[in-house]
Amino acid sequence: MQDNILVYSTESGKIAPANTQHKRQPSDGIVRIRRETKGRKGKGVTTLSGFDLPEPELKQLAKELKKHCGTGGALKNDVIEVQGDNRDKLKALLEQKGFKVKLAGG
């Protein structure tokens, strides 16, 4: 019998170590606002991406945007989601704050 047969090991694999964080995609400085319904059972959600802000500031901005629209939402993978179709309200508010904004998608 062979003594050096590896049957199972947890030392390697596709799982990232706990101390690594997801890397941000470099942004071109333009915030893109789009309306999405795919995968949401037909419910419309306005998504905002392209912010060059650290996590705490992004959370604060998401909170402010949701409050301005009077709806709920979430922050997932550096993308702010606001419930409903609020593209025009969000575009006006972000331009007022000094962001370059584009309406993307349909």
Image: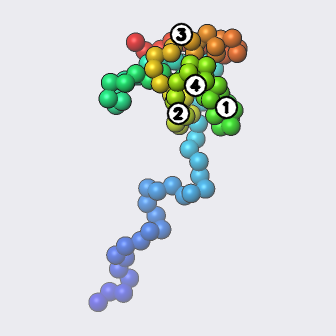
Going by the numbered disc 4, the residue's amino acid type is: Lys
Crowding at label 4, few (<14), some or many (≥20) Cα neighbours within 10 Å?
Answer: some
The local secondary structure at tag 3 comes to helix
The local secondary structure at tag 1 comes to helix
Toward which corner of the image does residue 2 lie, by quadrant? bottom left
Foreground: disc 4 or disc 2: 4
Residue pointed to by mark 2: 74
Residue pointed to by mark 1: 60
The local secondary structure at tag 2 comes to strand
Upstream in sequence: badge 1 or badge 3: 1
Q: Nearer the viewer, residue 22 or 99?
A: 99
Upstream in sequence: badge 4 or badge 3: 4
Residue pointed to by mark 3: 88
Residue at mark 4 to residue at mark 2: CA–CA distance: 9 Å
Upstream in sequence: badge 4 or badge 1: 1
Q: Measured from the top left, where is residue 91 in percent x and y? A: 58, 12
Describe residue 90's horizontal placement relative to residue 2 as left or right: right
Upstream in sequence: badge 2 or badge 3: 2
The local secondary structure at tag 4 comes to helix
Residue at mark 4 to residue at mark 1: CA–CA distance: 10 Å
Going by the numbered disc 2, the residue's amino acid type is: Ala
Residue pointed to by mark 4: 66
Residue at mark 1 to residue at mark 3: CA–CA distance: 20 Å
User: Which disc, if any, is residue 47?
Assistant: none
Describe residue 57's horizontal placement relative to residue 91 as left or right: right
Write the residue at 52% across / 28% down.
Answer: 72
Write the residue at 45% across / 20% down.
Answer: 84
